[in-house]
Amino acid sequence: MTHLDVKPDGVGTSARWSANMWGIHMGVTHEYREVVPNKQIVSKASVGPVLTFSLEPANGGTELTVEEHLDIPAPVVRVPVQAIFARITENDVQGMVANIKSLLETGEKTAPEPGEKKFTQMLTWSDGITIAAPVQEVFDLVKDPRVWLGQDVQVSDLKTTPEGVGTTFQVAWKVLGIPLKTTHEYTEFVPNQYFTSKAALGPVFKVEVAPENGGTRLHMRSDVVPRNMAEAAVDSLVIKMSERSQAELLASIKASAEARPGSR
């Protein structure tokens, strides 16, 4: 927290929150929009939630209630970001309230601040498609990262190994116009069954093939555990926005595999 600016009447008090996400410096500004002394404070983030702190007398002490409302005007991000905030904010708010209680009653912290908490919930995307081609033909096609990652991702510096495990490559792509890069490595590789690719940025991808109705069932999955709330919101957004393109990618792989010699 930096650039703290406290106003005499409360309204207009602001501070800058900053964090690093995927090596990209990001930040938002919180500002008190409403202040009713001894009753309520409403704080609005420049991007993200509105937090309302309400106070009421209770049993000789004070009952503190914190409510969060996500107010993001862009329709493309409202659904996925709101969903992820709803899933993770409860624990963060509980920690915040416990910390305030301890600071007032003992002068010491009792819980990590929300930004220090580690996000432990896995975010997953998965889908599959049936291909009228032999398992070996499909596996030989999709083991190439330029195939299973799709045309929107640039693959470079590909270094393959005879056994598959240890194959590495660089990838570059854009999220909301922001260029991102990372390194991948195949950490598991069972020919004609599956392989697993671990990205340095966090996600783990698994591509599987299996016989089905005389052809092949191709299944692709990605799992990621974000390090914090900011990454969780972005990862959820990326997964939501990628659903259509991933379906198109699977259809493209199906068409390519069925067009290859040896397919049925």
Image (cartoon, rainbow, N blue to C red):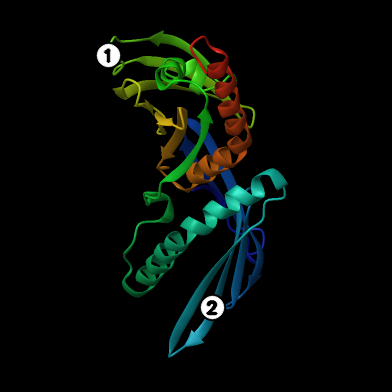
- Residue 229: image x %, image y %? 47, 48
Residue 262 visible to an observer of this rendering: yes
The residue closer to the viewer here, 188 or 228, is 188
Crowding near the residue tagged with mark 2, few <14, some 14–19, many ≥20 C-alpha atoms within 10 Å: some
- Residue 144: image x %, image y %? 44, 15
Marker disc for residue 163: 1
Q: Quadrant of residue 202?
A: top left
- Pointer 1 and pointer 2: residues touching (CB < 8 Å)? no
Q: Quadrant of residue 255?
A: top right
Badge 2 marks a residue whose secondary structure is: strand
Real-space Cα separation, disc 1 to disc 2, in angstroms: 63 Å
Crowding near the residue tagged with mark 1, few <14, some 14–19, many ≥20 C-alpha atoms within 10 Å: few
Instruction: Judge whether 17 appears above or below 186 on screen.
Output: below
- Residue 74: image x %, image y %? 71, 46
Residue depicted at 36% across the width and 49% down the height: 118
Marker disc for residue 135: none
Instruction: Please state which amino acid type lies under the numbered disc 2.
Output: Leu
Instruction: Please state which amino acid type lies under the numbered disc 1.
Output: Glu
Instruction: Judge whether 39 appears above or below 169 on screen.
Output: below
The residue closer to the viewer here, 12 or 188, is 188
Q: Quadrant of residue 136?
A: top left
Residue depicted at 63% across the width and 51% down the height: 79
Residue located beneath label 2 in the image: 55
- Residue 171: image x %, image y %? 48, 19
Instruction: Judge whether 130 appears above or below 64 on screen.
Output: above
Q: Earlier in the sequence, mark 1 or mark 2?
A: 2
